[in-house]
Every structure is written in C-alpha cells, then in structure tokens.
Image: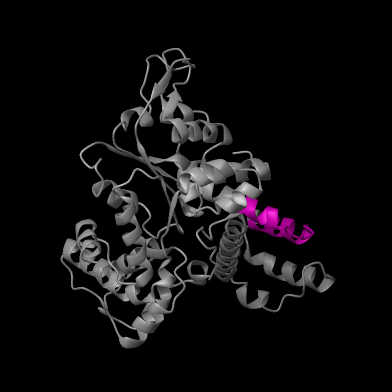
Amino acid sequence: MADVVSIKQRFGIIGNSELLNRALEIALRVAPTDLTVLVTGESGVGKEFFPQVIHSASARKHNKYVAVNCGAIPEGTIDSELFGHEKGAFTGAVDSRKGYFEEADGGTIFLDEVGELPLSTQVRLLRVLQTGEFIRVGSARVQKTNVRVVAATNNNLQRAIREGRFREDLYYRLATVPISVPALRERPEDIYMLFRKFASDVATRYRMPSIALDAAARNMLEHYSWRGNIRQLKNVAEQISAIESERNITPQILERYLTPEQGMSMPSVAGASSFDDMNTERELLYKVLFEMRADINEVKQILYRMGGYNAMQHVQPMGSEAHHHEVAALLPHASTGEVEYAEEIVDEEPQPATKADMQKEQILRALRRHNGSRRAAAAELFMSERTLYRRIKELGIEE
C-alpha cells in the first residue's frame, strides 16, 4: 500500500477508492515483468497514467517510453508509423524512416485506442508480440525489437471480436494481464476530492478565490452520473470557477453546468467502455434534440422581433386552412424576403426524420462548426477519428 501512495504522489493521481487502489496494485505487481498489459475503461478515466506507472516501476525505466494514439493515425499510414518504411515504399517516402517499435527498442510502447487498429495492422502487431519481429513497409528484411507493450482501449473488444473487427488471438496476446480502470461514478468517494483539486488549481493559476460547494451541492455532485468521467468533472470545475462571481456554490448554480446531455446515465460493460456504437448513436440523437430545441427558441425570438410571436402562439396546426390564414395575417410584419421564406415553409410537407437522418445531421453540423476538421468534430461528438470516418462512410455523408 505504501508503494501505491508513493505512485499517487509521483503522478498526481487523486483518490482512495478500493477499485482505483486495486488497479494501481496490479500495475505495480506486473511492472517488473515483461508481460503485455491491456488497460480498459471509459474515456476520461485516466487510463494514460497506468502505462507510465508500469514503465517507471520496470527495469526498462531508463530506456524510451513511446506513446502512440492509434485512433489519430490515418489508416493508410499507420503501418508506416508503427513499423517504419523504406525509401520509395510509397508516394512521398523520400527517405527511410524508423517506426515506433524500432524507436522504442529496449523500452516501453503504449498503444492507446488499440481497438481502432485496422485488421491488416493487427496481423503485424500480433507477429511483434509473438516473435518480436517486424518488417518495414516496402522492405523484405525481417528486423527484431525488444519492447514492452501496454495497450489501452475504451471499446468493447469482445463485441468487436464478434463483429469481426478485432482479432481474437490478438486480444488474448494483449490481455495477458488486464487492468480495468473504474469509471468516476463507481468511485463516488473521490468525486468531491477531485473537484476541490481542480477548483484549487484554477484559483491558484488565475489568482482568484477558490469556489466551495455547500452540503447540498456536494451531494448533487457525488450522485451525478459523470459520463465524461474525470475529464468532464475537471471541465465543470473550471467553468464554474471562471464564470460564477458567487464563490459559494449552491445546487441551483451547480445544476446549470450539469446538463441532461452530459449526465445521461449509460450502462457499463465489464472490462470495456460504454462508448460503443449503441451509445455513440444515443449521444448523437441527444445532441440533435438539444440543438433542435435551440433552433426553435431562435425562431421564436425572430418572430417576436417581427411582432408576430404572440399571434403565432395561437396558430392552428400546419397544413390546415386556418393555419394558412393565420400565417398570412402575420406576413405584413415581414419584409419581402421574409414573406417568401415563410410561404416556402408553409407549403412544405413535414417529413419524418429517421435515426440515421438525425445522426447524419449532427455529424454535418459538427464538421461545419470546425471547418471540416474531423479531429475537432470527433472530439465534440465523443468518438475517435476512425469511428467518425466509419460513420461518414456508413451514412453516405459528402463533406
């Protein structure tokens, strides 16, 4: 237990829950070996600390530690990034280049979002884990590397195996020692402690009084379903610290930052993330519904400025004869352009929106907001770039 306390202090890990301590104990016990470790848990729980803990407590600690985000590398270049390439292997390969496995020789390589690897790359990775051998892209020469592999994922790999998206033999090679990092809602005793730390950091950095929660607000904080886990909790603490002039936070203030969209409870999957395809779809639908509500409020404000909002409250259902007369009564308040726009809306027959339509609209909005940047859009939609790319292809979205 003394080692666990020391590691927490060294890496700034906050919390005393039994589940967190158990995960850290496993990491410390497996560190002196060269066994492959698979770290699982939802996005935002702090999985990235565990490979660092393992490397720092291993015999490889004086050698390189290389962290690779597999979900952020395009599918066409990931083999080159991991295993290197020879000059002329593909267009743009003007020089030979070492891959991450070659760079990390003698040290530790951390493969984050390993569930996003394409199947062809999974075959290459399996060979490295089995024999320590790899071949650069464009080469026929077999090379050796001596690396410790720690992988992490927030995907349900068992489901990916059933769907043919992840190799079962690779899964068992990676999960020689599994470590499950608990979600924040599974360690409620740590929530207030983390919140105080984040609020204190903001106050110190910007030289402002730190915020404090009253008893009722603390109770609300500890019973809230933190879908975004520690990352979301930090975001809320920083928002309140920066925006609120009142330093004593009540439940009425706190609930402004705990939106239904953020707090929607989702089922956990043992040893895997709840950020699977079903929940990604649910998240997209929630975002669409909230944006539709915002659009409706905006239309109301426009009508109010036109002088017709009060009358619109009594308009008959769209498509009825009375509806056409009432809308026509409002049109004199508008300019010529606005009249044409209103007439176009009245004549349009409403179409039912399918779930796919709503997902497609949400992805398009995110891409427009970020000028087509898939990385930024994926972050807003709580998914990896590779998952977003797959959704774009499935839904037939033309960017």
Q: On the picture, is 178 further left or further right than 168?
A: left
Q: Quadrant of the C terminus?
A: top right
Q: Looking at the picture, how far across and down is residue 235, in whole percent?
A: 35, 63
How many numbered marks, from 0 up?
Answer: 0
Q: On the picture, is 165 further left or further right than 17?
A: right
Residue sitting nearer the eye, 47 or 209: 47
**Res 70 quadrant in image:** top left
Q: Looking at the picture, how far across and down is residue 200, in whole percent?
A: 21, 69
**Res 190 quadrant in image:** bottom left
> In the rendered view, would you say 46 is above or below 176?
below
- Is 210 covered by the magenta stretch? no
Q: How is the structure coloured here?
A: one colour
Residue sitting nearer the eye, 353 or 188: 188
Mainly helix, strand or loop, the magenta region?
helix
- Is 340 covered by the magenta stretch? yes
Residue sitting nearer the eye, 389 or 291: 389
Asked if one can make out residue 382 in the rendered structure from this viewpoint, the answer is yes
Q: Looking at the picture, how far across and down is residue 191, in whole percent?
A: 34, 73
Asked if one can make out residue 370 in the rendered structure from this viewpoint, the answer is no
> In the rendered view, would you say 201 is above or below 131?
below
Q: Residue at x 52, y 67 (%)?
A: 261
Q: Residue at x 39, y 72 (%)?
A: 187
Residue extending farthest right? 321
State which region is magenta.
Answer: 338-362
Q: Looking at the picture, how far across and down is residue 107, in whole percent?
A: 29, 37
> In the rendered view, would you say 123 is above or below 258?
above
Q: On the picture, is 226 further left or further right than 206?
A: right
Q: Quadrant of the N terminus?
A: bottom left
Residue sitting nearer the eye, 349 or 44: 44
